[in-house]
Amino acid sequence: MAFAHFGKAYWKLTLSLLEHSTTVDLLIAVIDTLRRFATIWACMDIMRTIVIALEKAHQVWKARGIQSRPLLSLLLEFDNGKHLSDASRDRITSDITVFTSALHPVTDCPDVVPDVLPEILLLSGDPAVDAPSLLANTLWIKYRKSVDWAWKVWDNTVASLRQVPVMTSDEAGRRACALRYGVLLWHVDQHLATGLDGEVLQWFLGPGKNEVAALGSEAWTVLVVVLLYLCVHGTLKTTTILQGLVYPAWQQAAANVAAGQKGPMLETFLRSANDICRLLLLSDDINDTVPPVDLLDLQCIRTRRQDVYCSPHFSLLASSIPLLICVENSEHISKELRTDSMSLRHLISRHRDFRQGAYRNLDAIREAFELSLQRLDEPSGALGKCIVTGLRTVLSDICEELSDWPAVTSLLSPWKIAATMVEMQLVLKQMGQELVRDPRNSAAHANLDQLILMLFHHSMTSEEAFYVGDMARGVDNVVAGKFINNGLKCITEIIQDSRSAVQNLSQGFQRAGELLRVLIYIAEPLREGPEPLPLVDTSIQDDFADALASKIHSMEHFATSNYAPEMVGGEESEYMVLILRLMQFELGFRTVWSSKMKEATEKAVSSLFRIAVACGASIDTNLIIYPLLIDTLYYIYDEIPVDLKATPYDPFHNYPDASVSDLPSELPVGCHKQLASLLPLHLTTASVSHMVNSHKDAVGNMIYGTAIVNRPWEWIENLGEPMAVDLTEADIEREEKERLESMYVVKNSASLSLDTFGTHITGEGVVKATHATEHRRKGSLQSFGDGLSAENLFKRDWRETRVESEVEATAGVASGRPKGETDQDAGGVFQTGPRTTTPRGSPSSMSRGSGSVRQSPQGTANRRSNSTISDVIDVDGITAAPSKRPLANKRKASLAVAVSDDEIEIIEGPVPSAAKKSRLKPLAKAKAKKQ
């Protein structure tokens, strides 16, 4: 059909045979033909015509009393809910339901089939033509209500076939007996609603696996005839025989080879499996002894063969090819059988249908061969090389060497490029597994480097670059690192060779761009994966950085001296973008910053900054180059290491040595801010504005040096205040209490001293509460300490005249003293006399060292222990009155306490107690004078 080009005449002939077919065999042949060329019918847009013809044929055969399961199955498959009317589709579904219930009636009491059916064994001696059909009808009538009667019939048939060589000695008699059993099974299949194929596959994968492995060579001859007959007549699918017999035989042989086992039964099983596979997939011969015996049988074989090369069955065949490679390389298998296995593999791999299936399912081919490599202990050994060669045989007739790959792929179709990618992926995985197993294998390193350099030295289009990058996806981290290192090495060579003027770099930079595209494709999955990025070799990164720095320096000279519009939109702009992309790509990987790398990067950074200034100051700022320059500078400044041992330590060592005034005035505001952020600015602060470095010379004179720069990272580390030693816990607690009574405790033990920042203690904070002394302490701190905000008059008056007196009174009652009596030690002073002066504002804004000699009596009483005045203040006359009568009026009594400093007379020398009353008169005089 493919050569005659008469498709239209062919399908008309097929439909004519379908209409006039009178035998079941001819009907099956027509159905197989229609199924085989289903893709062609769909392309010719005649599926509706074929569906209508199939429906008519179904009605004709139904009128004859025959329900053809293959015909109904093909009709529903081709219709796919598109061509038939709803009434026709419902009628066909109803026919299938009636047909199924008639063949297998539903019952609550299913029949029980005995394990041994002796009538099946007796069929071997019955030469009658209708004996198989009569036996099939009998078995169906007896056991049709059973769910496993077909499985039992197949099991007994295989057991009977094992006895045929014993009962019959000549080959013709054995062949006739085998055909008799084939007819029996075909009739049994006609009595099943779902067919015999599923039951046979279940038996092969279950208990039948051991039974077929124990068959002798003569029994296998009989079984092969039965299987071929069933396959020709549609009872068994080719995929069922391969999946149930052939593939398990290859798996068992490969497993025994790995274990070092051998035996005659294994070789018999393997040889028979190879023969069945060859007859089902490769043979197109017609003979009189073994099916196919005529053209119709051959047509049926070819139709069944087509399913093997389509999904999902093709993946099973593809995964079995490496098993044959293992078998043919085993020393435990006879040489004859190994040669037979090799010949079978080559025939399958080079078959047109298999190769088309391989190109349609390249992922299945790749996964099958990669999995076989992973199971090997030595991927780079002889067996691993044979597996790679086997993949080449599958994908092409000519097994070209890898060195010929670039020359071949440039003239190939996209299919061939994809196949070559699969081949290269397998080779890379093989080398990667070998390096993972033995990282010191110098031969494997050399082979991998040679392969990668061969790819990189070949000029590639964007499509080929994508394929090369795609073939490296999924490889081991070692192989990916090899790609990155060799790619950077090739780019370095290209840049070093192009030492000419900037305008003549087109060819070299085009090759560098192609390689960068490949490296980006390779690195993309690495950046997204959980594993760390590969480490770039030190020598390669040093040469790469030096080459880029030299090229950037030449571009800086061109940009700063002859800056013109062609730098903005010409080839030079593309070269600059490529250089920046190369630098960003290399810095994205893990690197060890050697001295050469640092030197080259510092040189490149200086040039990049000048280029950025020139680009930003141009008339037409390049919206592509300038952002790339800024981003690259930011990234380098963040990544380049700073020498922590340098004296003095300078984190701005790599930044441009310039000031803001050096920037061009024509820079746009945005560019000016960005470039200014890259300058090492040291702003002056109040803490260091008037500080200079100083030292004493040998004579002792103070020598003043340079001003101190605001660099906190250079400040000497403060280890805190020295710890006191040999102090008991009680002493430490007592000192803390004494300090708490006067001021807060601030431990200046941070890494940077608080004095550096001009820190001082204020009077505000959280005070530890100690019942009655809480308000006294709070008053003391607020009166003689600095605060962040001043206390208003009302708050101070309330605190000093009411709150503290109430606290003192409450404390006195609690201690058993009468109201109004004060404790001299506590510093409480009360007076009921009238008050003639107005209280002043709160002294909270006064510092501790600047207090006046004249203090308020309340403040003096509260700070007796901290007073620096040695003069004696006589307050007995003031306290005499409130000690004689109780506190009648809180407001009046409390007002007596707040005596002004002007009303206190200081008397030098000791005063006798008898003179207390006489001192009231001078006090009155003082009041009179003030009035």
Image: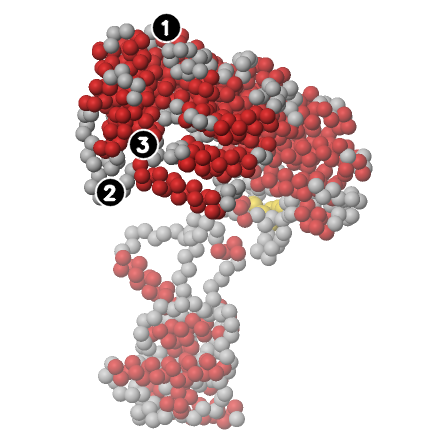
Does residue 414 appear in this view? yes
Q: Earlier in the sequence, mark 3 or mark 1?
A: 3
Disc 1: which residue: 336
- The N terminus: image quadrant: top right
Picture coordinates of residue 847 (x, y %)?
50, 69
Q: Label 1 to label 2, Cα distance in Å?
A: 55 Å
Q: Are marks 3 and 2 in contact (CB under 8 Å)?
A: no
**663, 446: nearer the viewer:** 446
Q: Label 3 to label 1, Cα distance in Å?
A: 44 Å
Q: Earlier in the sequence, mark 3 or mark 2?
A: 2
Picture coordinates of residue 795 (x, y %)?
46, 80
Residue kind at label 3, given as amino acid type:
His
Q: Left or right? Give the position of 711 relative to 311.
A: right
**863, 472: nearer the viewer:** 472
Picture coordinates of residue 725 (x, y %)?
32, 51
Q: Secondary structure at mark 2?
A: loop
Does residue 542 appear in this view? no
**In the rendered image, the vertical position of residue 526 relative to residue 778, given as above or below:** above
Disc 2: which residue: 107
Q: Secondary structure at mark 3?
A: loop
Residue kind at label 2, given as amino acid type:
Thr
Q: Secondary structure at mark 1?
A: helix
Disc 3 packing (10 Å; few <14; some 14–19; many ≥20): many
Disc 1 packing (10 Å; few <14; some 14–19; many ≥20): few
In the rendered view, how is the structure colored?
Answer: secondary structure
Disc 2 packing (10 Å; few <14; some 14–19; many ≥20): few
| Label of residue 191 in the image | 3
Q: Left or right? Give the position of 781 relative to 790.
A: left
What residue sits 61% from the left and 42% below the top? Answer: 634
What residue sits 36% from the left and 8% below the top? Answer: 337
